[in-house]
Structure formats: structure tokens, C-alpha cells
Image: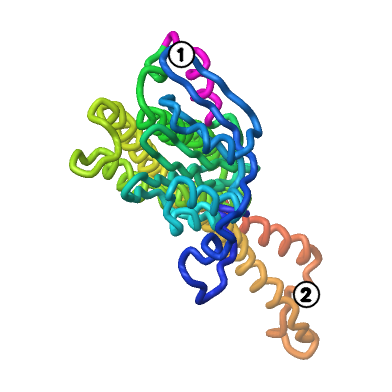
Amino acid sequence: METRQSRRRIRPGASPGHAIETVAADATGGRVDWVRYSDTEMTEESAAPLADVLDSLGDGQVNWLHFDAPPDPPVLRLLQERLGLDALALEDVHNGGQRSKLELFENHSFVVVSVPLLHDGTVKVEQLSLFLGPRWVISVWPGPPSLLAPVLERLRSGGTGRIRTRGADYLLYTLVDAAVDSVFPVLETIAREVEDTEDEVLNGASEDTLAGIHHTRRNIIALRRLNVPGQEMLGALLRADDSPLGAQTRRYMRDVLDHHMRISDMMESLSEMIRGMHELNLATLSNRMNDVMKLLTMIATIFIPLSFVTGLYGMNFNPEVSPWNMPELNTRFGYPAVLLLLAGVAGIMIWAFRRRDWL
């Protein structure tokens, strides 16, 4: 059951940026999905040679370079050499498992967004890595393509929106917005699980119900771990003094922060609900156990006098030796009389229990 971000193993004691800076400086690049656009035109190319794409970044258009998996060190080394990307940021892309953050450098910015996904009902976190330059955005997303597909559709239908008329910072905003909004379907799915679990608890708790509560609780905890870093990253993007976004784009990014706050509120509500259900489930199981113990205690109480009577007449004293030695053993209807006595005692006790609402 995976709820944490997957990351590559880093050799203890390795120097920072080791995986990138040890590659030869003349490393050849791989291939990248490339979209370039302006307010009047747009072109896109899949699996384009990275070196050729980097040669065409200065044509005045906005360029979006997308990798659908973390690039190998030679590819990252080429990006470092040609675009001046920071080696530590590239190592974060290579290793993965980073929390949401914003890092500012001299000629570019690096943004990490932790995106939760549901995999077989379990929250799994993937890393969306974004580099923002003057006229380009580089994205690395190993998750499902459906996350960024709406952004590409907006670019293709640029005549109906503002995305083609804005700069690279607006493209970065749309990618961050898509990543943040993708949390809502995950929360809605978990909310339905919480409602189903609540019905199970109210209809009768069980051990399976308790296991489901713990599973949902772990999912919510995994989501809450992303809350504070994500809020800090969005807050850094909105700070006017050092934000890589323009004033107009920051206005839209505030809406993303509002969405993030709504997500935080939803997670708090789900946490309270699951905590209450956990306590209710334990109380229900405890009450059920108390009912069982109560029933067993009453059964044992009923049999106490019956056991006394049968034990008394099981002592087998010989009445022929003395008239005090159980003369009832010679009574003609002694055995049926004792059975009636036992039934009467049990009946009176059951009547008394029911009168007191113990049964």
C-alpha cells in the first residue's frame, strides 16, 4: 500500500548535483514533446529532438517543453548547459519525491507541485516539476497525461481564451492550476468512501469496517502532508517582490490559492468525519461486546440457583441410614417436582430481568 512519494535511491554521502554534473559536458539530448505558440499561431511536435528544440527557443514565441518521465542525466546535463538550469534543481527532477516548493535563480525559476493520485483506492503522490524561463516552460510529469491535457486543449483553441495572448508565466499558472484542481476529484472519491463507511458504521460496525476506516484515514493523512508545502509554494508565487509571475498572472494565481484553501477545508472536514466514525465504530463494537457479556452474565445468573439445587441433590446421602439423609429421594414424584422447581426459578428470574429491561 503506497501513500508516499516514490524517489530514487541516493548514495549516502554523494555530492549535491552529482548525478548531473558528472555527465560529459557534450552530452547529446533525448526527445521532448514541444509546443510553441503566439497569439496568432501554434505548432506542436511529439518526440522532437531536444537539441533542435533548444536551438529554436529564441524565435519570440512561447515554448512549452514537456517530458512524460524524469529525463536521464545526459538530457538534464544538456538542459543545464544550454539553458543554465540549476544542477540541484535538475537533481530534484531526477530523484523525485520532493515536496511542493519554489526556488528562484538568476535566469529561471523552479516549481515543484506534489499531485496526489488514487491508485487502487490508495493515495499515491507524483511530482510535477516546472521550470520557467523568459519565453519557455519545461514540465516533467510522469503521471497520467489527463492532468495536463486540458492545458493543451486550451492552447489548441486559443481563439476562445487568453492563454495564447499571455506569456510563459501564464502557462506556468495554468499548469499549477491544473495540478491543484486535480485534488478535487481525489477528495470527492474519498468523501464518497467516508459516506459509505458512515452508513456501514450506523448499520452495524464490524472488523472490516474498522479496516476501511483506517485505510481512509491513511489516505487523508497522506493528503494533509501536502497541504502546508503547497500553501507555502503558492504564497511564494504571489509575493510581489520576488515572484517570477507578472502582476496580471499573480491575480489569477490568487484564485489557485483560494482553491487550495477550499481543499484544506475539505480535508479538515473529512478528517473530523473519519475521526468521529472511528470513535463511533469503537463505541459500537464496545457496546456490542457489552451486550454479549450482559447476556452471558444473565444466563450464568439463571443457572446459579439451578446448579445449586442439582448439586444439592447430587450428594447421594443414603436415606435408609437416617431420616435426615435426603428423604426426598424416596418421594414418588420427587424428580418431576425438582424439574418444576428448576423451571419455576428460571422463569421467575427471566421475568424479573425482562421487567427491568435487561432482556
Magenta part, dominant SS = helix
Taking 64 as reference, is 131 above or below it?
A: below
Name which residue type carries label 2.
Leu
Residue 240 picture location, percent across and down: 19, 38
Q: Which residue is at 40% across, 39% downward?
A: 132
Does residue 197 appear left or right of residue 340 in this picture? Answer: left
Q: Which residue is at 45% across, 27% downward?
A: 59
In which image quadrant can residue 270 be found? top left
Residue 298 picture location, percent across and down: 57, 60
- SS at mark 2 in the image: helix
Name which residue type carries label 1.
Gly
Residue tagged 2 = 329
In which image quadrant can residue 335 be found? bottom right
Residue tagged 1 = 158
Q: Which residues are magenta?
A: 148-160
Q: Is residue 206 visible?
A: no
Q: Residues within 10 Å of mark 2 (few under 14, many from 20)?
A: some
> Is 158 colored magenta in this rendering?
yes
Q: Quadrant of the N terminus?
A: bottom right
> In 3D space, how far apart are the residues under numbered discs 2 and 1 (Cα atoms)?
106 Å
Q: Which residue is at 43% across, 9% downward?
A: 160
- The disc, 2 or 1, on the residue closer to the chain's N-terminal end is 1
